[in-house]
Image: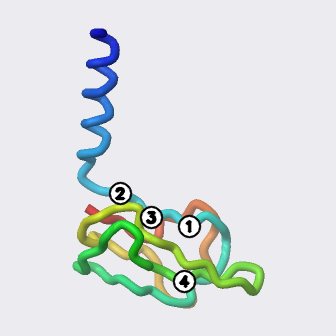
Amino acid sequence: AKLKVDFDKSNKNDSNSSSHSIITPMAGVVLKIIKNKGDAVSKGDDLFVVESMKMEQIIKSDYDGIVDAVNVDANEQVSAGKILMTIS
């Protein structure tokens, strides 16, 4: 039982992290930045449109919070795993 309590405490600390990174799952070009620094976002909100291999992919938020930083510009080429935005 003690191990379970410690595990639950660890999970709680992870969910209270001060900021979250939004990462692109594939290489491509950022076509559109939908949310900007200071904007409120909710889980499921559209954040970016990225084009990869002539297909548009909408990057959505996995978190509720406020946009701290946008780390890319429109029409910027990005590689897979690039941190596009941080949300706190």
Q: Residues within 10 Å of mark 3 (few under 14, many from 20)?
A: many
Numbered badge on residue 20: 2
Residue type at tag 4: Val
User: Along the horizontal axis of the image, is 76 left or right of 39?
Assistant: right
**Mark 4 touching mark 3, by CB under 8 A?**
no
Asked which quadrant contains residue 88, the reply is bottom left
- Judging from the image, what secondary structure is the residue with disc 1 in? loop
- Judging from the image, what secondary structure is the residue with disc 4 in? strand
Color encoding of the figure: rainbow
Question: Gap in Å between the C-alphas at discs 4 and 3?
Answer: 13 Å
The furthest residue to the right: 53
Question: Gap in Å between the C-alphas at discs 4 and 2?
Answer: 19 Å
The residue at the point 58 percent across, 60 percent down is: 81
Q: Which residue is mark 4?
A: 49
- Judging from the image, what secondary structure is the residue with disc 2 in? strand
Numbered badge on residue 22: 3
Taking depth in this image into account, of 45 and 29 the one nearest to the observer is: 45
Residue 54 screen position, x and y as percent:
75, 86
Specify which label sits upstream in the sequence, 4 or 2.
Answer: 2
Residue 66 screen position, x and y as percent:
24, 70
Where 10 falls versus 83 (above or below)?
above
Taking depth in this image into account, of 69 and 7 the one nearest to the observer is: 7
Specify which label sits upstream in the sequence, 4 or 3.
Answer: 3
The residue at the point 43 percent across, 78 percent down is: 47
